[in-house]
């Protein structure tokens, strides 16, 4: 994807959807969103405050004199905007960089969501990131295997929102017909902090491919 063209498409879309003079945004993590915050004219778009899970995005926001919202903010956020390379029809996955808890907070706390992606794909061979407490890692792996869910894992050096400890990310193989049952089973295991499945609701999908945009409202 051409980042400059994507930034222009996002900026043009944001300038049309809301005539409020000031808007409060939550910004998802990742290189694309970091590039957007760095290059877009946030003041022109009416973005007055931002909540983000990314430390690198925070540093850019500070330089742009945009107010950063802390996670104890109690009011609703106007919009979430995030990017994933590929999405599924009713959900997307995120969390390879190990900040699933923070990302899910800013996503669910926003009134409306804007998700940018290159295409919608099927659920075949899906590995779901799962944030877990490190000291219970092997217990969780054992419990997942008992529930017929295969998984792999990797260590992440960054700290997490819920425990403040070093984290580990498991990758659970999605092999259930029912997505909600899959999430519920994983969440029922002691030591699991967050499943990296984000259900798509109150969301506008911007599918950008070959510099063309397709808008889908969910």
Image (cartoon, helix red, strand yellow):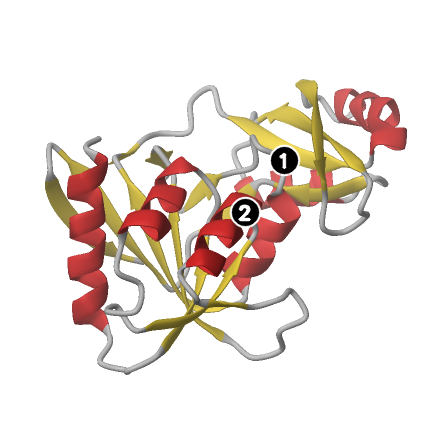
Where is mark 1, residue-wise? Answer: 98
Question: Can you tell which mark lies on residue 54?
Answer: 2
The picture quadrant where one finds residue 100 is top right
Among the two numbered marks 1 and 2 on one chain, the one whose residue lies closer to the N terminus: 2
Q: Is residue 182 left or right of residue 146?
A: left
| Near-viewer residue (106 or 41) | 41
Residue at the image position 36 percent from the left and 52 percent from the top: 37
In percent of width and height, residue 6 lies at 20, 43
In percent of width and height, residue 200 lies at 42, 53
Residue at the image position 40 percent from the left and 44 percent from the top: 34
Task: Report if residue 215 is visible in the image.
Answer: no
Instruction: Say which element carries label 2.
Output: loop
Quarter holding the C terminus is bottom left
- On screen, residue 77 above or below 8: below
Query: Few, some or many C-alpha atoms within 10 Å of disc 2 (few <14, some 14-19, many ≥20)?
Result: some
The picture quadrant where one finds residue 61 is bottom left
In percent of width and height, residue 161 lies at 72, 50
Q: Is residue 124 left or right of residue 9?
A: right
In percent of width and height, residue 42 lies at 31, 63
Residue at the image position 82 percent from the left and 28 percent from the top: 140
């Amino acid at each position: 994807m051409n980042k400059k063209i994507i930034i222009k498409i996002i900026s043009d879309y944001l300038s049309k959807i809301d005539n409020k003079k000031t808007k409060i945004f939550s910004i998802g993590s990742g290189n694309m969103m970091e590039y957007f915050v760095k290059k877009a004219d946030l003041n022109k778009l009416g973005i007055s405050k931002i909540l983000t899970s990314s430390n690198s995005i925070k540093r850019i926001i500070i330089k742009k004199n945009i107010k950063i919202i802390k996670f104890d903010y109690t009011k609703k956020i106007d919009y979430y905007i995030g990017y994933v390379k590929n999405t599924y029809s009713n959900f997307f996955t995120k969390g390879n960089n190990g900040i699933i808890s923070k990302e899910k907070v800013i996503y669910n706390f926003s009134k409306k969501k804007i998700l940018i992606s290159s295409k919608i794909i099927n659920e075949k061979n899906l590995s779901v990131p799962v944030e877990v407490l490190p000291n219970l890692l092997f217990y969780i792996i054992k419990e997942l295997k008992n529930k017929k869910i295969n998984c792999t894992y990797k260590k992440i050096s960054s700290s997490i929102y819920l425990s403040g400890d070093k984290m580990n990310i498991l990758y659970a193989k999605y092999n259930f017909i029912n997505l909600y049952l899959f999430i519920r089973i994983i969440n029922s295991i002691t030591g699991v902090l967050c499943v990296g499945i984000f259900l798509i609701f109150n969301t506008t999908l911007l599918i950008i491919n070959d510099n063309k945009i397709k808008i889908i409202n969910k």
